[in-house]
Image (cartoon, rainbow, N blue to C red):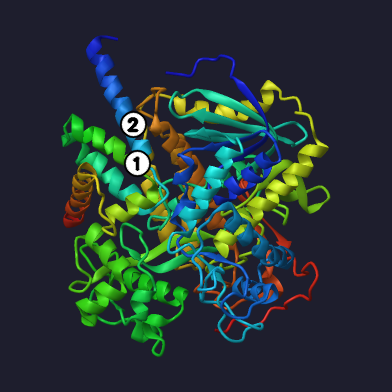
Amino acid sequence: MPIPHRPIPHRRFDALIIGAGGAGLNAALRLASADLRVAVVSKVFPTRSHTVAAQGGVNAALANVLPDDWHWHMFDTVKGSDYLGDQDAIEYMCREAIPTVYELEHAGVPFSRIDDGRIYQRAFGGQSQDFGGDQAARTCAAADRTGHAILHTLYQQNVRARTHFFDEYFAIDLIRDEEGVVLGALALEIETGETLVIEAKATLLATGGHGQVFRTTTNAFINTGDGMAMALRAGVPLMDMEFYQFHPTGVAGKGMLITEGARGEGGYLINGDGERFMERYAPRALDLASRDVVARSMVTEIREGRGCGPSKDHVMLRLDHLGADVVHHRLPGITDICRVFLGLDPAEQGIPVFPTAHYAMGGIPTDRYARVVAPARHGPEEVVPGLYAAGECACVSVHGANRLGGNSLLDILVFGRAAGTDILDYVAENPNHRPMREADIEPALTRLGRWDRTGEGESVAAVKADLRKLMEDHCGVFREDATMAEGVEKLKALRERVERVRLQDQSRIFNTARIEALELDNLVDVGMATLMSAYHRQESRGAHSRVDYPEREDEQWMKHSLYARDGDRMDYKPVRTKPLTVESFPPKARVY
Amino acid sequence: MDPTDAATAEITTHTARLRWQCRRGMLELDLLLSRFLEVGFPALDAAGRADFVRLLGYQDQILHDWLMGQAVPADAAMRRLVGQIRAAMRDDAAVL
């Protein structure tokens, strides 16, 4: 049943925030507290955003447990980024980390504490004192549920500040006028199937990551890259999309993370022949070799026919030699996962594992004020008026080619807040809504209307499954020229197939099939951005590891990738190596 | 629309709504809840279905603790349902 043509209702707000995770809610709180009219659009209930899954914590150089300094935090972050991070943004984030954590503490986040009442800080990998010296302790946590605590606190504060929530609304596309100014977005109310235009003086994309583009991922079903794809369709390129963090050991076929602690306790990997194959790839470090080496070795075994199981599509992690006492008491989380999802006891049987996609370093390019920037007439970083992005969907870029543990919650909080601060100024300078013409809304309506076509066709689920498999096979942890070139061709063909997909359910009320179709559009767009960026970067840096170009090549490749949807074009721009107030950290070989 | 069609449409809409409610912030919950909706929910009686709707109203972190066996619900109906959801997942694992 085609959607009848009738006037679409409009609602007006000062600011529109798309996505209700930590970044979106922190921005919303700043704005609503300053008495702006703020709308938050979220496809699920806000406290069901993926921030809730972040267990680790937030880095800030509070020096509560061991000596620390924001400048050391900055050094570690630049080094961890493999020198692809922008040093002005990194300096800003590391300085702002300290007041950000205190602000959260005052807002009511129940951080774990040391005996004298100050916030406890735990040590994580990649944290050093004195620019690469002894281990630092920099991560503030609320037990093992930091993300949950932050999300709930921010949500409650927003309700109190009278933020207007559009729960279970799906954002279709941004609305831009002829001059390219972003005027808001078209949204779909999932319950009724009705569309709504939300006009705003400023719009923030805070929609999170896109792990669902890979078959095996730790990401929730909601992580479909919606904001990134909206930016692409609005003509904004995506930046550094080839940099995607994989963990070597996810539960095969399901994706949940089996922590590295399992191998730390003495767990080891075997192939289908029962061989400890890491002896061949890393004779000294064995199963404790770096993440990318372990992950690529696993996939190499599978590609060469030595996988486990009837389809030979995974390898096994063995813990059974450690004894039930060690496994159950030191690795309780893994024991629970195995019992619930695999129906096995890891103290008795091997765990089927495969590398699992976890976190996107790339995304919508922004400056350190969270303003979206794109190449235009006057240079590679011209501000897109009225548009902001923060959190995993954005690339500011503080993580560069790889992210340190404890820096992702920090990123969403600092840059969510920065977006709020800048939007306050922007709205003060642009106090009036700009006129919106019917023609400005038309592209978004066309996108939605495409799914009204009836007749025979492929199903969303089948194309989505093929996309996820394709991305895993051609743009996962095993990256080389021929594999990715083939992947690009296959993905172009799959993109054509999407045109032939038809929805069998054309009802309006709670038609989740329509939402899943719109998500498929988004996944295909961010998948192409990821694959094209990876194919073209002929070096290994951070999380992007190429078999055929194993070295980092600073002279040619210390630059950011930009993928534009129009013509699948690649472009590049320089890394910002100049910090705000301190000396630059020049690139050094990455040795840990 | 005749009354039978209307009733069918209502059930379909209700299931679609529940399916969306099974979308959570954590992959573990997505897998457990959507699997149960598919294989366990249709066999529940009216009271069991009402319990499932009530269960979906709990926060993600609480559901995670219950379903992963790290905490036990005090409410007997929730306790029973958590057992059924875990069992549905184990049956799924046995098929693989």
Counting residues from the start of the chain, the first of labels 2 and 1 encountered is: 2
Q: Is residue A502 visible?
A: no
Question: What is the chain identity of the residue bearing mark 2?
Answer: B
Quadrant placement of the N terminus of chain A? top left
Q: Are marks 2 and 1 in contact (CB under 8 Å)?
A: no
**In the rendered image, which residue does mark 1 sit on?**
B22
Identify the residue at the far front of this view: A116
Horizontal side, residue A136 vs residue A224: left or right: right
Mark 2: few/some/many CA within 10 Å (<14, 14-19, 20+): some
**Amino acid on which the number 2 mark rests in the picture:** Ala
> Which residue is located at x 58 percent, y 52 percent?
A107
Q: Residue at x 63, y 46 (%)?
A: A567
Q: Nearer the viewer, mark 2 or mark 1?
A: 1
Q: Quadrant of residue A73?
A: bottom right
Q: Nearer the viewer, residue A503 or A17?
A: A17
Residue at numbered disc 2: B16
Q: Secondary structure at mark 2?
A: helix
Secondary structure state at the residue bearing disc 1: loop
Does residue A24 appear to the left or right of A377 in the view shown? left
Q: Using the numbered discs, state the Cα–Cα distance from disc 2 to disc 1 in whole angstroms.
A: 10 Å
Decide: is B50 above or below A346.
above
Query: Where is residue A520, by image quadrant?
Result: top left
- What is the x, y in percent for residue A6? 56, 14
Callout 1, which amino acid? Cys
Mark 1 Cα shell of 10 Å, populated few (<14), some (14-19), many (≥20): many
Q: Is residue A461 left or right of residue A325?
A: right
